Image (cartoon, rainbow, N blue to C red):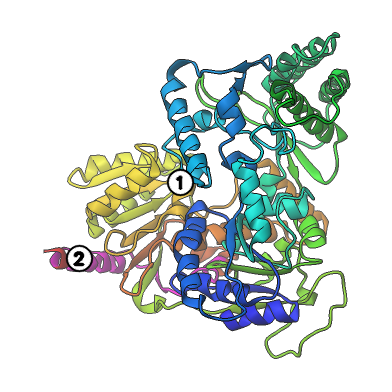
Amino acid sequence: MAEAVAEALSEGEHLLVQAGTGTGKSLAYLVPALLHDSRVVVATATLALQHQLVERDLPRLVEAVKDQPGVDASYAVLKGRSNYACLHRIRAGVPDEQGALIEVPQGSMATKVLELRAWAEQAAEDGETGERDHAPRHTEREWRQVSVNHRECLGAAKCPFGEECFAERAREKAQRSHLVVTNHSLLAIDAIEGVPMIPEYDAVVVDEAHELVSRVTQAATDELFAADVDRAASRSQRHVDGSEADDLADAGDRLREVIADLPAGRIDALPDALADALAGVRDAARACLSAYPKSGPSAPGEADPGLTQAKGSVQEVFATAERMATGSEHDVLWVTEAGPGQSGRPPHLAVAPLQVWGPMRDRLLSDKVAVFTSATLRLGGDFGAVASSFGLKASEQVRPDEAPRERTEDVLPWKGLDVGSPFDYGQQAILYVARHLPPPGRDGLGPAQLDEIVELVDASEGRALGLFSSRRAAEAAAEAVRERLPHLTTLAQGDAQLPELARQFVEDPHTCLFGTLSLWQGLDVPGDTCQLVMIDRIPFPRPDDPLMSARQRAADRAGGNGFMQVAATHAALLMAQGAGRLVRTTTDRGVVAVLDPRLATARYGGFLTSSLPPMWTTTDPGLVRKALSRLAATADSDAR
């Protein structure tokens, strides 16, 4: 893999590398990245991998090459502005709804906010980074009291604390570094939305690349709440002399009324009432912005932070309302459902790009070399599905036996490489498809599925990770296992925070952990802790998912197979990630049990199965229960 990455960087070719857990893929791209003659950006999807790179892999690598002449081993971490504490907000206060600055936090948050302020001041004194990841434990709401987003920031030139600013220091360090470690979202904002966030670079390595399309989509998604309009209008009252702030508040009230009358779901054509309401918010926000006092260049300390942040909130409302009112065929607009309970989020509007492969192709892949790597890139036995989602075409692929190809279009040619795995899946894992079960229905888990789950968990004596398509299904399974196997410990997502649940799962082998999406990808529990992974149903997107259904329809209209290109590809990625929870080391053994018979009976089953690790496959429930019982007995014997 290291040789392939080095060749891609030197020859100017894009590269997709599937590298399983345990292959050492981080070092396989970090080494050639350090040897490359220009700056390289490494983008990850998760904080866990970013920490691994910055706190473990890179320091060890830098130590190893420190005596090598000509190797620039400098590196930096770069995140979005809101990931750093803001010294101005900490020292001057947080704006209230009218834009006035409140110097002392109020209410139950006061103690935590004061703790965060003290931590940030100490970090500034000690020359530390001020990153959120290093802060004392806190909630999202508490962190917002000590941070700002890019619209609220005064700018280094106007801020009295600009020279100390954590975010600016991070950018300055990145400017001096050969390797910049960042995240998918910042990469998307920089390269695809054209907002300069990262210093000039020659090549990018995208790790956890199976997440890239989702993260780019998230970065390009905007939401509009009526409460956002209210807040922007309220903050403007102090800075606008005319009636413009009141007009904006009235437009927000009208938007709230219209949203309340709309059913949740995708909006294919803007209803007249919604079109008028959005145009009203857009025009009122534009007028409000024009009514703000004009400010010329000011010296540090002379900027009005309340005005800057109030104006920023109006700019955000304007930009989002204008995008939604345009009704572009390249966007998908929908009304969200109300959140559960009184504390849930009210219905609001959301807009996302119909597809991201076009912008990725035009703005990232046309002038940068990109290396994409993950444990799951080869779906259905081929790289084509994932490559096309990035904006790469099948006609641009260079096969292993082909000679190097000249660049003929606007994008560099690409190669795919599967470096395999250190694990012997045929010997270490069984894929069990419960073919005898009825197909899953809309009403969640039926009696047959619950019986199957209880029997499998009983055979494995716990040691089970249940991956479910919904919170309701996970809770129903947990309830059934608790009732019928009370001697085991059964945990469900939501019983505690994920790190606490993972700790309990590891400490007690006779434990089951049942949950939804964050467990499919975010849990690493090697050893005897996990010998059974259960997947309740093939994780196709919901038929009423606004964005996925729109993408599927667009693929059909373009002459493709929308179900296979969108729904089946989505399911294949998730299943591969879920199945990957089982075997994490060369000594792990166990069963991946899929309780959806369609994996064995449907035409698309072969595509999904070939996207999974090459496990030994069976549909015999008796054989699987015996295998799990033997594994449990061996684990208990070893523990004694």
Instruction: Give the vertical position of 397 relative to 200 (above or below).
Output: below
Disc number for residue 304: none
Q: Point out the image quarter for the C terminus.
A: bottom left
Dot 1: within a 10 Å radius of its alpha carbon, few (fewer than 14), some, or many (20 or more) residues? Answer: some
Residue 568 in sight here = no
- Residue 517 in sight from this viewpoint: yes
Side (left or right) of 46 relative to 331: left
Dominant secondary structure, magenta = helix
Name the residue rendered at 38%, 51% in the picture. 466
Q: Work out which quarter of the rendered image holds the N terminus and state it.
A: bottom right
Q: Is residue 351 magenta?
A: no
Q: Position of residue 611 (x, y in %)?
A: 55, 69
Q: Position of residue 531 (x, y in %)?
A: 31, 62
> Badge 2: how crowded within 10 Å, few (<14), some, or many (20+)?
some
Q: Find the distance from the CA under tag 2 to the CA under tag 1.
A: 27 Å
Which range is magenta? 608-637
Three-letter residue code for mark 1: Thr
In the picture of the structure, the residue carrying the numbered disc 2 is 635
Give the camera-side residue of 306 and 467.
Answer: 306
Q: Nearer the viewer, residue 78 or 414?
A: 78
Find residue 630 and report its image quarter: bottom left
The answer to whether 310 appears left or right of 330 in the picture is left
Secondary structure at numbered mark 1: loop
